[in-house]
Image (cartoon, rainbow, N blue to C red):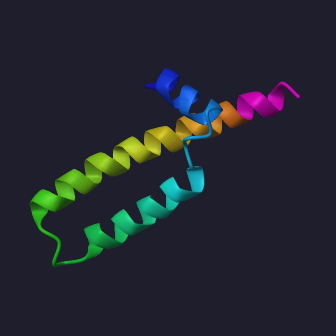
């Protein structure tokens, strides 16, 4: 997954800020009492994926800045 993320970053396909915004939307849905348990499970899986991608993005950006 890290290699795929690196390729997305280099191709500018990954949008960190949009991912953070999606995580915020997911948090609101999970906190909403009307959200079904089955939906919460899918939302948590999606958030796990987004968090991993964001961490990878930040790692990659840190590496790039350290090379400057």
Residue 58 higher or lower than 66, as above or below: below
State the residue lying farthest toward the top. Answer: 3
Q: Where the C terminus falls, by quadrant?
A: top right
| Count of numbered badges drawn on the protein | 0
Residue 2 percent across, percent down from the top left: 49, 25
- Residue range of the region highlighted in magenta in the rendering: 62-68
Identify the image quadrant of the N terminus: top left
The residue sitting at 37% across, 42% down in the picture is 49
- Magenta stretch, main secondary structure class: helix
Residue 3 falls left or right of residue 28:
right
Determine if the magenta segment contains residue 18: no
Q: Residue at x 18, y 78 (%)?
A: 33
At a point 44% along the width and 66% down the height, the residue shown is 24
Q: Height in image: 20 above or below 29?
A: above
Residue 65 percent across, percent down from the top left: 81, 33
In the displayed structure, would residue 37 be above or below residue 41?
below
């Amino acid at each position: 997954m890290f290699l795929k993320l690196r390729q997305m970053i280099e191709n500018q396909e990954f949008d960190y800020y949009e991912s953070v915004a999606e995580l915020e939307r997911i948090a609101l849905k999970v906190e909403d009492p009307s959200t079904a348990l089955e939906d919460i499970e899918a939302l948590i899986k999606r958030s796990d994926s987004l968090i991993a991608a964001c961490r990878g993005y930040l790692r990659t950006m840190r590496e790039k800045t350290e090379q400057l």
